[in-house]
Image (spheres, rainbow, N blue to C red):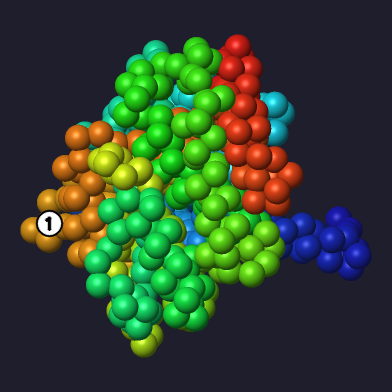
Amino acid sequence: MTTPAFDGKAGRSAARACAMAAMAALYLLAACKPVPATDSGVFAAPAAPVPAPVTISALIWAPDWADDMRRIAAEFHRLNPDVNVALEFMGGNSVEANLKPKVAAHRLPDLMSVNPNAYAAELADRGMLADVGATQAWQRLRPGLKADWLSPNGKRFGIAGGVAATVIYYNKSMFKQAGIERLPTNFSEFLGLCERLKQAGFTPLYFSGGYPNLIANGAFSFGFANNIVPATPDWRARIADGTLELDNSAGADMFSKIHTLVQRGYAQPQLMQSGYAGSVSSFVEGRTAMAFDGTWAAGGLLHPQGFEVGLLAPPWNDHGNTSVPVIGSETGFAVAETANKAQALRFLEYLSDAGFTIEQAKRQNISPFISERATPEGDPQIIAYLAQIERAPVTGSPYYSMLPAATIDVLHQLIGEVLSNKLTARQAARRLQTSIRDESRHNDK
């Protein structure tokens, strides 16, 4: 019998095959290795993949607190890592002008600034804005503000950003140097005060001709409150149906008071190039004796270096008439009916709670929420001013909450043309009346 000869090449191939088989077996054993048990003896499931954060869009009106809004968004994300906030800030002179292109393109952001007016209410009733009535923010909103945020169909379409009231901040040192010992109680006396300040070498008042919504919030809103509201109790209904009469002496007077202050040299030079920021800086730097601004600007205006600040209720009433103050909701926030509605509602809740605390630390505006704290939120002088307003038997509203959206833009233009002497006060009143009448025929007020 013959022994077969050894084939070295075949032997090496067989060895490699055995090694590869052994390695495959080891891989199979590793793959079949049991999942480690927990201390309780229960086998732990593999960790689920972490979903990517949802990014919500937020279009915000914050001309004087953009940095605070960035901090609010960052802090919200830190506490809610599953939600990113993509901020975009509104520009121009009105909230509505920023929203209209978004509405036309059917691309509303998930959360946005809105005003408590007919335009936003119409968006809500058209199904574009969510009802926020189930939120804690709505439950905590001051009862007196809730009516501002109800649509005709009863939808609760937003949350106020604060209590809005306009007030004249004044430099007590300048008033003393000008010999002013008694504050004016009507518009004639106010003109006399301005003249005394001017004769003492001071610029009495700051007017933002380049940013007319500050004048509209202040001088126009008070003119409307004192000239129109007491004589026309149903003024809101008349704006809605387009029958409000302004082509008369009362309507013209709203514009003529503004023009008179400028014509007599009671405002700063080059006022038509002056913007919003100047309202604060010119006052705190001692370049004007007064700033006609809102309670929302209290943090920047009440505590300058070198002098004390007082608050004057704007005396826009005529002699013999009771002054009618202006109060309402600040520009607030709404949530759109989008795929990210749930996350946007969470951000709304944060904005109305811890986020508002961040904002108010700088602005010192009046909280729109019922507080459980023993001490009211906000600057004490502003809180006292609010209490004074709330005792008034009749009040007016901020212009942005009562006028149709397109009329807001018309008013801004009219104020500029009156200040530039391109229109008379009566012509401006007539055009304002026409705009209100025309807009009453549109659905998107």
- Tag 1's secondary structure? loop
Does residue 268 sit above or below 287 in this rendering? above
The residue nearer to you, when weighing 135 against 305, is: 305
Does residue 74 sit above or below 217 in this rendering? below
- Image quarter where the C terminus lies is top right
Q: With 328 as the anchor, is 277 left or right in this view? A: right
Amino acid carrying mark 1 in the image: Arg
Is residue 359 visible to the viewer in this orientation of the structure? no
Residue at (40, 34) in percent of width and height? 227
Q: Position of residue 201 (x, y in %)?
A: 49, 81
Does residue 215 sit above or below 248 in this rendering? below
Density class for disc 1 (Cα within 10 Å; few <14, some 14-19, many ≥20) is few
Residue at (36, 38) in percent of width and height? 226
Residue at (70, 48) in percent of width and height? 421
Does residue 66 sit above or below 196 in this rendering? above
The residue nearer to you, when weighing 209 against 332, is: 209
Residue at (41, 16) in percent of width and height? 237
Q: With 230 as the anchor, is 405 left or right in this view? A: right
Q: Which residue is mark 1?
A: 373
- Image quarter where the N terminus lies is bottom right
Q: Position of residue 266 (x, y in %)?
A: 53, 65
Q: Position of residue 316 (x, y in %)?
A: 38, 47
Q: Position of residue 238 (x, y in %)?
A: 45, 16
Is residue 251 visible to the viewer in this orientation of the structure? yes
Q: Quadrant of residue 16?
A: bottom right
Q: How many marks?
A: 1
Residue at the outermost left position? 374
The residue nearer to you, when weighing 227 against 386, is: 227
